[in-house]
Amino acid sequence: VVEWLGDEMHVTEAPACTNYIISDTSFYGEEEGDGRYKVIMEDLDKCGCVASSEEAMGFLADVGYDNKASNGIGTEWSCVYDLDNFTVVMCADVNYDKKMVITKDTFK
């Protein structure tokens, strides 16, 4: 995970990231963030960091944030990249029932 804090680039070996800093959590004065990173790491620990695309999207659903109605902030999109098959599965606005699949043949 590559993060830019102040005027420095920080690289952290991590299997996941959320919208919160993981390389130096005290940078913004938040030690814990909002708990989403902990949840996704628990999901990854359960599967040994090996998951199908469907399982991975489930992990993203576990940490999706839907609060747009009250304050306009929320998860815009969630993407699962399958580098072996060159596909991307995308869900928008925490609607995990509606998936868009992009393949090397459909990407233009």
Image: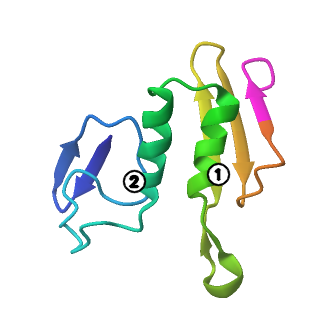
Image quadrant containing the N terminus: top left
Residue at point 78%, 32% (across, down)? 101
Which residue is label 2 attached to?
38
Q: Residue furthest right?
A: 98
Query: Element type at marker 2?
Result: helix
Q: Locate residue 98, reporting x and y percent.
A: 84, 47
Q: Which mark is residue 61?
A: 1
The colour scheme applied to this rendered structure is rainbow
Q: What element carries label 1?
A: helix
Residue 62 in sight here? yes
- Which disc number belongs to residue 98? none
- Please state if 91 lies on the left or on the right of 30 as rendered: right
Mark closer to the chain start, 2 or 1: 2
- What segment is highlighted magenta in the picture? 101-107
On screen, residue 79 above or below 7 = above
100, 16: nearer the viewer: 16
Q: Quadrant of residue 85?
A: top right
Residue at position x 71%, y 59% in the image: 94
Instruction: Give the image location of residue 34, x and y in percent.
Output: 41, 68
